[in-house]
Amino acid sequence: MSAGWDDIRLFLAVAETGSLSAAAAALGCSQPTIGRRLKALEHDLGLTLHERHANRIVLTAAGRAIASEAGAMAAAAAGLDQAVRALARAEPEPLRISATGSLAYFLALHQPELAAAAGGVAVTILASRDRVNLARREADVALRMRRLPEDGDLVARRVARVAHAVYAVSTGVAAVIGLPDPERRPSQAAWLEGWAAGRPVPLRLGDVALRHQAARQGIGATLLPCWLGDGDPALIRLVPPPRELQEDVYLLVRRDARGEARLDRLVRGLAALFRTRADALSG
């Protein structure tokens, strides 16, 4: 024995209004239709659910039990409908950009430009050098200074070239703010260690934003991306950008994600931002 939700909803309307005519008006159908479907429901269930008394419907004990259960079902259905409508109205989740520390800093400082170029797409910026698996949606876009052997069918495009140079508050600064792991070669840390040529290194900082602030405080000279050092009037460039420290920036996305409207807008916005800032990035 079984009954469809439409028939249960019809029976619940009869139970709540107490008459076939009122139920018909509430549901927007005819009274004969209500009566016919109510009889069919009773036949399917093998139960007598109502008795007619003059101008009203009186539920049997079985009818009252079914009405109680049907009321709970109706409440659950209404809750589900509200949840679906709320989700439809809700803002979509921000798209996630995984970027190295310096690129994350660049994006954060130029967020208004990125938002305008990307049509207002909301983003979350994840600052990390760790490999991310775009195929498993650990991020939607990855920005890296080199092509990484990431898992999945990915599309990579070069969007910028970044140059670096040494900056300080004055040409008379003797100390150097180093980078961690200067023994690893080739690396920015090793290059800066060679440039220091015996100058004291009282502090080593891996985070580019921290090196920037330390240099501004006069602690020492340090290596910074040209877009950051040249853009700060408090700093002076001490050496031309060495060619060996130039790095290409690659934008990676999943191949099967192309065509998603929000992601496409973000990719175009990122490309536009790097294009308009190309001179500053390249030094």
Image (cartoon, rainbow, N blue to C red):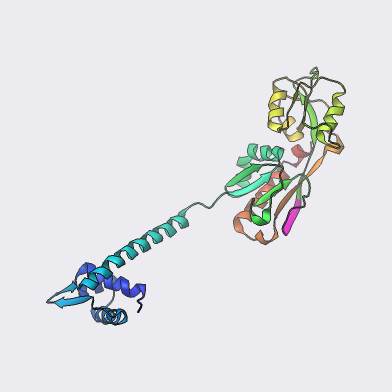
Give the vertical position of 143 relative to 236 (above or below).
below
> Where's the C terminus, which quadrant?
top right
**Residue 229 in the figure: left or right of residue 269:** right
Describe residue 114's horizontal placement relative to residue 150 as left or right.
left
Q: Position of residue 72 (x, y in %)?
A: 32, 63
Quick one: 11 or 33, which is closer to the camera?
A: 11
- Rendered location of residue 255, percent (x, y): 70, 60
Q: Position of residue 208 (x, y in %)?
A: 71, 32
Q: Quadrant of the N terminus?
A: bottom left
Q: Along the line of sight, which residue is nearer the eye, 16 or 164? A: 16
Q: Is residue 156 magenta?
A: yes
Residue numbers of the magenta segment:
149-157
Q: Specify the quadrant of the image occupied by residue 263.
A: bottom right
Furthest residue toward left: 54
Rendered location of residue 49, percent (x, y) = 23, 75
Q: Residue at x 87, y 28 (%)?
A: 194
Residue 155 in view (yes/no): yes
Name the residue: 67% across, 54% down.
134
Q: Is residue 234 visible?
A: no
